Image (cartoon, rainbow, N blue to C red):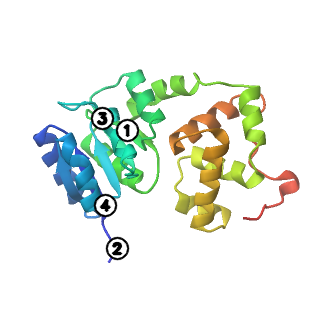
Amino acid sequence: MTAKTRVMLVDDHALCRSGLTELLEHRGDMKVVGATGDPAQVVPMLREHLPDLMVLDLRLATTDGLSLLRMIRAEGCETPVVILTMSDNEDDMSAALRAGVRGYLLKDMEPEEVIDAIARAARGEMVVASAMTLKLAQILQSGPRGSVKGDLVASLTERERQVLDHVASGQSNKVIAKALDISHNTVKLHVRHIMDKLNLRSRVEAAVFAFEYRTSPEGVKTTGEGGQKPKG
């Protein structure tokens, strides 16, 4: 029997927590292992339940979600996070993506869209509410371009460029490993090297970087010269 995806909810509205719990568990492949609206309980619950994904509201009664996220990371908890919020503010989404969240969803989305997006995020994909795609494009277009990015991309190996291209498409490490015929651990190693070389903090930032570079005159090259398949 396939193990269920373990999800933790952080939202200070009890009705939202209970409703989301019911919707997630109705799918049959996800289980809510913890739900709270108290920021002080978040780290202990993360350590106790070890969820695969945390769904976090951006606005909490006593703090904001991103401050809580920074505190969580400072405590050494690396659980992937998806923001679920009422805020369609571009600055809020930009700050969340730069903080390394795996997704940014809106509470006024259709319930089935929210649940499907959470499931995809749990599989390693990056998810953004469709209503925010135009604002996401504006965020992507606001970063540095040209030779600075070209110099950074030049530091990548050909295989790292291939992995970056797949990351930019929102693919999980498992999918990338299968596509490139390499091991899951090798993909993780390549992703870590990419993050280090490009001074990035998350897969979302990597996707932003790749998009920006593709739209520059230089572009991102993702295949070896002469069509040769690099090893490793």
Which label is found at residue 65? 3
How far apart marks 1 and 2 lie (CA) works out to: 32 Å
Q: Residues within 10 Å of mark 2 (few under 14, many from 20)?
A: few
Which label is found at residue 50? 4
Residue 69 figure quarter:
top left
Q: How many marks?
A: 4
Q: Residues within 10 Å of mark 3 (few under 14, many from 20)?
A: many
Q: Nearer the viewer, residue 63 or 90?
A: 63
Where residue 137 appears, x then y in whole percent?
Answer: 53, 27
The residue that mark 1 highlights is: 70
Amino acid beneath label 2: Thr
Circle nearer the N terminus (4, 1): 4
Which of the two marks, 4 or 1, is nearer to us in this view?
1
Q: Are marks 4 and 1 in contact (CB under 8 Å)?
A: no
Q: Are marks 2 and 4 in contact (CB under 8 Å)?
A: no
Q: Is residue 126 left or right of residue 45?
A: right
Circle nearer the N terminus (3, 1): 3
User: Residue sitting at 44 percent across and 36 percent down?
Assistant: 99
